[in-house]
Amino acid sequence: MNTLRKEPKVSSVAASWSEVGEEGADQRIDNFLIRVLKGVPKSHLYRLLRTGQVRVNSRRVDAAYRLRLGDRVRLPPVRAAARDRLHSQTVRRSALQPMLRTLLEDDALLAIDKPAGMAAHGGSGVSRGVIEWLRAQRPELRFLELVHRLDRDTSGVLLVAKKRTALTNLHAQLRAGQVRKSYLVLVKGVWSNETQHVRLLLTKRVTPSGERRVAVTDAGQPSHTVFTCVHRFRAYTLLRAELLTGRTHQIRVHLSHLGFPVVGDEKYGDFALNKSLAREGLKRMFLHAARLEFRHPLTGDMTVVEAPLASALAGFLASLEESPRPDEVG
């Protein structure tokens, strides 16, 4: 005997209209829906667009439509049960959220100290990154977008825009080379120069497993990093790296190519050394976004945001042997 499966009873919410403000202007309609209809699966949102249940100014639009200031968006009824279920899951996940220490916050910007091991955004096998956590934790903020990104294993200053105008302004500063990014990085070996400019052509590829890899090639994109010696130890050197271009894995590839691999780097580093250091307690890459300098998008004032070294990195530095003085050599 065939048994009919009964659908669970769910409540629904009435259709509503939303007028696009500054935070939604120039945003794609699909991204707008993801933000305002939190908890609704993306596949369902795209179905709503395809079937014309989402309308802008009473007209059908496709997913690529960019909203304009003052547009009126019809938000169709959605299944509240699905949203409630997803909300409860979000609450449970939020309890597991690592501490995201706020370094600066005002009406336009939010700067946080990203921990190592947490992706800046979801994707590539990561269901949820910093930006998704922030949106879940700060639902009162109608607009939150990453200004730039950090590798998952890199800690330090990560800047988020709370207004679209701030995001556009900072992206323009990045393209013009007006944002100064400074990193602290520990490398294997004793660096000889006080300051060194490194310019290499880098090519990015994606492995069959979806991993990003970068190599130095003659056909690559130009990249430029300025390295300054901060402190020499007996077998390591602490460097300050200033990015003048923003290629994927730029600092790590530059240093590996020069024969000074980043301590703890699992992609381009000294794998035997990394295993040894992990047994001693250093279980992460020693690359830290220490300082970000830019003009504030609202005031134009020069703004500096700094993040101190994580305790694991500071503790490892304290354990290292000092480089011998010249009068001690020989």
Image (spheres, helix red, strand yellow):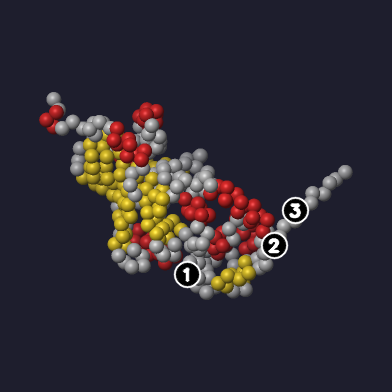
Residue 128 at x, y percent in the picture: 52, 48
Question: Which residue is the site of mark 3?
Answer: 8
Q: Residues within 10 Å of mark 2 (few under 14, many from 20)?
A: few
Kind of element beneath mark 3: loop
Question: Which residue is the site of mark 1?
Answer: 22
Q: Residue at x 50, y 71 (%)?
A: 21
Q: Is residue 176 visible?
A: no
Residue 167's image quarter?
Answer: bottom left
Q: Amino acid at mark 2?
A: Ser
Label whose residue precedes the other's in the sequence (3 or 1): 3
In this image, 95 relative to 52: left or right? left
Q: Residue at x 51, y 39 (%)?
A: 209
Q: Residues within 10 Å of mark 1 (few under 14, many from 20)?
A: some
Q: CA distance from mark 3 to mark 1?
A: 39 Å
User: Is 66 or 309 nearer to us in this picture?
Assistant: 309
Label whose residue precedes the other's in the sequence (1 or 2): 2
Q: Amino acid at mark 1?
A: Glu
Marks 1 and 2: which is nearer the front?
A: 2
Q: Residue at x 37, y 51 (%)?
A: 157
Q: How many marks?
A: 3
Residue 212 at x, y percent in the picture: 44, 43
The circle drawn on residue 297 is none
Q: Is residue 214 visible?
A: yes
In this image, 266 relative to 82: left or right? left
Q: CA distance from mark 3 to mark 2?
A: 13 Å
Question: Which residue is the site of mark 2?
Answer: 12
Q: Residue at x 13, y 25 (%)?
A: 330
Q: Amino acid at mark 3?
A: Pro
